[in-house]
Image (cartoon, helix red, strand yellow):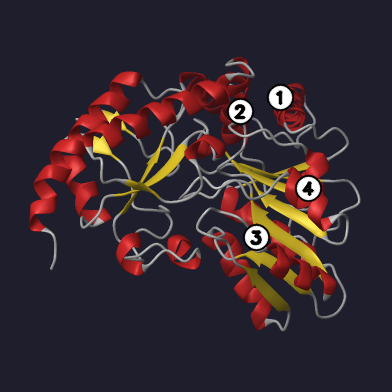
Amino acid sequence: MVRAYLDNSATTRPCEAAVAAMTKCLTEDWYNPSSVYKPSVEVFRRVREARELILATVHGAGCDLYFTSGGTEANNLAVLGAVERMRGRQVVAVSAVEHPSVLAACERLSQLGHDVRYIGVSRNGELDWDALEKALSDGASLVSVMQVNNETGWLLGGEKLHDFVNGRALIHVDGVQGYLRVPFDMKWADMYTLSGHKLHGPKGIGALVVKKGVKLQPQHVGGGQEGAIRSGTENTPGIMGLGAAVREMVDMGPDMPERLMEKKLRLIGAIRKAVPEMTVNGADPAVSAPHIVNIGFPNVRGEVMLHALEGDGVFVSTGSACSSKKLKVSAVLTAAGVPAREAEWAVRFSLSPHTTEEEIDYAAERVGIQYDLLKRFQRR
């Protein structure tokens, strides 16, 4: 039985509004939005409404929005699509702690002969601005940085990055972990990625917001949907579910991130009381994302703590869900200079607006009990 779900950066439980919207679409409004009879026109209108709602949440008036199958496809479209429309060999700057969907796209660019520069990040989540300046001075045409790091909660892509780049390159911000939990304005970027299942919407739906004038090479070809940038019949149940989830998050009010931060700080305080030895991997939690904290439990491997807590009905993670079955030590923490031994101790806790104080207090209690037991069996 789940007593405390604190792995919301991996995925979130779809909200009732999203499930209801998808069910209605599947059972009543199942028509193809590209057809011209009345029921299809009504579905097309609802897709447009969802598109306009999402654009409004990022101050994206005048921008385009392309629905995709999720954050991975949107990131691929941004990185590969932008560079493939440029002539000649390009310099691309990307943070070294990006999601695999961005890093793999950059690896492909490298294989095609482009010059990809990986920008380091400090243990406090600060970009290596000197390295980024060097890449820009060498003619970088694209900078890709995530808004919120999915493992640590570092704030990386936003107004400061925009001011630093100062129009010298296109900026792509992966907002999958930040959208609606950290404010964002499309005046800070040329492309912005989001994903439905990270904010109580369904899996299999995401979007890429793009400023007018930014040219992309389509990665899907066919029927010409989504302005011929993303062909394929629209996933209307997913779009309706995403729109409903976004509406619910917006209706929580502008102080929702502040309330979420209060929950995170409550969790950290409760765990620190139970485990005084604990450490926080990353910047001061009060100036990081309001829903993610990465905690080290000295001399207890994160994977061991994860499974111990699972037995108590507490669900957490050791890092990115996309790579948790492949890596024993977090590549993000390693790239930020955290020693491998300390990185092995890391556990990520991620909250949502629906996380309760009861979940937080129960999780902290079980963390303390399990740590007292597990530290007795530390490796020598």
Dividing the picture into quadrants, the one containing residue 368 is: top left
* Residue of label 2: 240
| Disc nearer the start of the sequence (1/3) | 1
Measure the alpha-carbon separation of dots 3 and 2.
23 Å
The answer to whether residue 196 of the structure is visible from this angle is: yes
| Disc nearer the start of the sequence (2/4) | 4
* Helix, strand or loop under label 2: helix
* Helix, strand or loop under label 1: helix
* Residue of label 1: 46
Mark 4 Cα within 10 Å, few/some/many (few <14, many 20+)? Answer: many
> Is residue 66 found left or right of 9 in the rendered image?
right
> Is residue 64 found left or right of 21 in the rendered image?
right
Mark 2 Cα within 10 Å, few/some/many (few <14, many 20+)? Answer: many
Measure the alpha-carbon separation of dots 2 and 1.
8 Å
Q: Amino acid at mark 2?
A: Met
Mark 1 Cα within 10 Å, few/some/many (few <14, many 20+)? Answer: some
Q: Amino acid at mark 3?
A: Asn
| Pointers 1 and 3 in contact (C-beta within 8 Å) | no
Measure the alpha-carbon separation of dots 3 and 4.
16 Å
| Disc nearer the start of the sequence (3/2) | 3
Check the image and report above or below for 340 versus 166.
below
Q: Amino acid at mark 1?
A: Arg
* Residue of label 3: 76
